[in-house]
Image (spheres, rainbow, N blue to C red):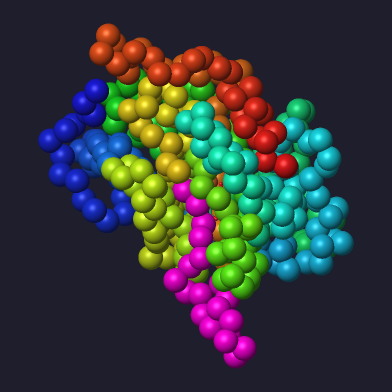
Amino acid sequence: MAPASSHVTVKSTALDFRHLRGAPEEFSTFCFNFVDRLQVEGYVAVENHPWTGNKVGGLFEISQKFFNLPDEIKKHAGRRKGQEGNRGWAYVGEENVSAITGFAAGVLSEQNLEDLKETFDMGKVDDSELANLWPYQADLPGFRHLMETAFESGHHILLQLLRALAVGLGLSEDAFTKQHNCRHHEFRLLHYPAVPASALKSGESARISSHTDFGTMSFLFQDDVGGLEGESLREEGNYLPLRTERKDVMIVILGDMMMRQTNGILRALPHRVTLPSTASINAEGEEWAPERFAIAFFGKPDRDVWLEPMQAFVDESNPARYDGVAAGDYDRSKLLRLY
Ligand SMILES: O=C(O)CCC(=O)C(=O)O
Ligand SMILES: [Fe+2]
């Protein structure tokens, strides 16, 4: 299906979030470029969004403080055994993403790699199905407040980008936003400790193995260490670096639930974190990857939303490629493989 406003020129730099509130021409140019980049490159960089500058800076700062706490203290927020969702702190090696490599395509990988990362996940504040887990307030004052505030504003950023996506695809403005009322998203801090390069080359461990995100739309922030790569949509198996000039430039990618609803017109981007080019040789002559921090917001529809290819993307020559499934069931079935 042809995106709306196909006369607009595509720019190659980051898109300017302020255009979503700009004149109608700016708004439609943003929507067109947003869809075009996602279709052609599989990702799009966005700047001048509400987290620009201090907000992202503050999140990286508190993330560093959290992960620097001793494991004994982080354990207060440790994920619980049998927990059906991502909440709290997961230690290095607890969540292993190679278990879901190929999940969306229905071809699971045989590989069983240990992830050399630790994470902290939270969801909506009053989720009766899945409670958030926090360290003691005295151990990291302000952490919970900052995370909860960012989660709420992340929800609103997501809604604006989902609206732009719908408009860019020629759908009604609320086609996706109306599926995202309950805030069933996840907000994640990631820390990849410094490791010898040999660990990432051994075939036994990875920073994070190739995967697609589960939900509709994710946004990512990273420090300047590097190593994040996305699979080229033109050449299977060819991974290209996803770089940002500054920590507060947001990389937007799509997840499985958007791919299913658009009948594959928009693809969920396979991505991974590998040995960065910033790896260096230490005094003992060993190559080391420096520690890396990243932040991710995973937008997910309400758990009871029925996901199936939308009418606009299905016709005789493009039959539905995906069965219908409830968002919550899809999410759970993929998530349970991770731990
Ligand atoms: O560390 C990153 O930049 C990406 C993390 C990621 O892809 C994930 O947690 O799903
Ligand atoms: Fe991811």
* Residue lying at 63% horizontally and 57% vertically, measured from the top left: 204
Q: Nearer the viewer, residue 71 or 126?
A: 71
Q: Position of residue 14 (x, y in %)?
A: 31, 54
Q: Residue furthest top?
A: 316
Q: Position of residue 34 (x, y in %)?
A: 31, 41
Q: Position of residue 89 (x, y in %)?
A: 75, 51
Figure check: 18 above or below 54? above
Asked whether residue 214 is drawn in magenta, I would say no
Q: Nearer the viewer, residue 171 or 338?
A: 338
Q: Name the image quarter holding the C terminus.
A: top right
* Residue lying at 62% horizontally and 41% vertically, measured from the top left: 99
In this picture, residue 249 sits left or right of residue 201: left
* Residue lying at 67% horizontally and 54% vertically, measured from the top left: 114
Res. 64 image quadrant = bottom right
Q: Name the image quarter holding the N terminus.
A: top left
In this picture, residue 225 sits left or right of residue 118: left
Res. 207 image quadrant = bottom right
Q: Nearer the viewer, residue 188 or 209?
A: 209
Q: Nearer the viewer, residue 302 or 114?
A: 114
In this picture, residue 286 sits left or right of residue 219: right
Q: Position of residue 231 (x, y in %)?
A: 39, 47
Figure check: 236 above or below 6? below
On the question of residue 151 being in view, the answer is: no
Query: Number of marks in the image?
Result: 0
Q: Which residues are magenta?
A: 271-289
Res. 326 image quadrant = top right
Asked whether residue 283 is drawn in magenta, I would say yes
* Residue lying at 29% horizontally and 11% vertically, measured from the top left: 315
